[in-house]
Image (spheres, rainbow, N blue to C red):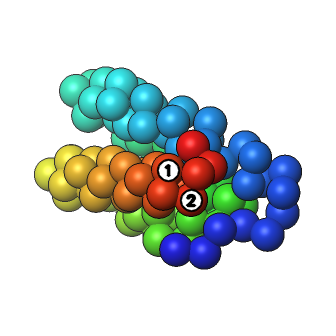
Amino acid sequence: MKLPDDPVILELLPEFVDTWITDIDTQFKELMESKNSDEMYRMGHTLKGSCFQFGLDDVAQLGIQLMGHARNQDWEAAEELEIKIRTSFDDVKSFLQTKGIM
């Protein structure tokens, strides 16, 4: 994993990761229960854009997949992504901890 070169982005990265972990643990589950495809699409879109800005390209790609699943109302596939997204953020957090950033 490559850390962002921008010191401001690097400083914000730990809070960004923690916020997304919380959002996945709460909002994602709520959206799955309500089957709200518009809001799930929005979450995927936000995940994509914000992760690209923070240099988390692999997680951003999961956001793109989530957008497609929401658009198609493929809730089974979206649910499978929850674990991948959460695990990806956990991996980023562990990496940041090993680098002494978090």
State the residue at coordinates (36%, 25%).
26
Horizontal arrangement in the rendering, residue 10 relative to residue 95 (left or right) = right
Q: Is residue 84 left or right of residue 94?
A: left
> In front here: 100 or 59?
100
Q: Please report the residue visible at 62 percent of the width from the left and 36 percent of the height from the top.
A: 15
Q: Residue at x 62, y 49 (%)?
A: 101
The answer to the question of whether label 2 and label 1 lie on touching residues, with beta carbons closer than 8 A, is yes
Q: Residue at label 2?
A: 99
| Residue 25 x, y percent position in the rendering | 33, 31
In the figure, 94 relative to 19: above or below?
below
Amino acid under disc 1: Gln
Residue 53, image x and y in percent? Answer: 71, 61
Q: Closer to the camera, 91 or 67?
A: 91
Q: Is residue 27 visible?
A: yes
Which disc, if any, is residue 97? Answer: 1
Badge 1 marks a residue whose secondary structure is: helix
**Displayed quadrant of residue 88:** bottom left
Q: Nearer the viewer, residue 40 or 15?
A: 15
Which residue in the rendered view is the most extreme toward the left?
Answer: 76
Q: Is disc 2 surrounded by few (<14), some (14 to 19) or many (20+) residues within 10 Å?
A: few
Crowding around mark 1 (Cα neighbors within 10 Å: few <14, some 14 to 19, many 20+) is few
